[in-house]
Image (cartoon, rainbow, N blue to C red):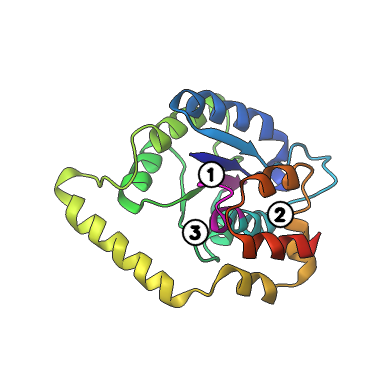
Amino acid sequence: MRIALINENSQAGKNDLICKALEKVVGPMGHVVDNYGMYSAEDTAELTYVTAGILGAILLNSGAADYVVTGCGTGEGAMLAMNSFPGVICGHVEDPVDAYTFAHVNDGNAVALPFAKGFGWGGELNLEYIFEKLFGFGHGKGYPPERVEPEQRNKKILDDVRSKTLRPLTECLASIEPGLVKSAVAGEHFAELFFEHCKDQEIAEFVRGLR
């Protein structure tokens, strides 16, 4: 699995800590982490939680990433931004139980974490435990065991509903103010990470037209 890490501006100073915690946990599982920044509060290319949501949607819909880990001060704004787009099911995760149940009950492809609220002594340990429960036990198996069948059925129903209510990503992006979308893909290492792993030519061409 290719996991993309995205940090918005208010929590950019924690990027290195978060990336190290994520790589420490998922590396031995065979997963790969692509760090899309922000890498520090001084980065020239700035991401807000809104543009982080645009970037996350581009990565997931294009196949450049299989999963997105993002967040903001509380995680709420990042979750809302991510869930504004097709092809994204983003959960709000504060602790390891949230991580495990989201992975197995909701079977999404992105999480938004609070990187300021409640992030004190032992914050990096909580991150590691979250990532262990999120990526170490599979996805979509249901929880608790007696609820597996209805939960898996409801997930299929949700996917079907979303397929009928959300437009294709390139249509969404084309309707957004171009400067906003352009700022989402302006990161220092975006091009080298994205174009190597992108699997959707239409999205790739749309992004090339922005740069």
Relative horizontal placement of residue 8, taking residue 89 as reference (left or right): right
For residue 123, above or below residue 81? above
**On residue 48, which mark appears?**
2
Q: CA distance from mark 2 to mark 1?
A: 15 Å
Residue at the spot of label 1? 113
Relative horizontal placement of residue 12, taking residue 77 as reference (left or right): right
Q: How many other residues sit within 10 Å of disc 3, few (<14), some (14-19) or many (≥20)?
A: many
Residue at the spot of label 3? 88
Q: Secondary structure at mark 3?
A: loop
For residue 168, above or below residue 200? below
Residue at 78% x, 52% y is: 186
Which amino acid type is shown beneath numbered disc 2? Answer: Thr
Which amino acid type is shown beneath numbered disc 1? Answer: Leu
Answer with the quarter of the image where residue 129 lies. Answer: top left
For residue 193, above or below residue 131? below
Which is nearer the eye, 5 or 11? 5
Q: Secondary structure at mark 1?
A: strand
Q: Secondary structure at mark 2?
A: loop
Q: CA distance from mark 2 to mark 3?
A: 18 Å
Which amino acid type is shown beneath numbered disc 3? Answer: Val
Q: Is residue 172 magenta?
A: no
| Percent position of residue 76, x then y | 54, 54
User: Magenta stretch?
Assistant: 59-74
Furthest toward the left, the residue is 146
Residue at 75% x, 42% y is: 189
For the C terminus, the image quarter is bottom right
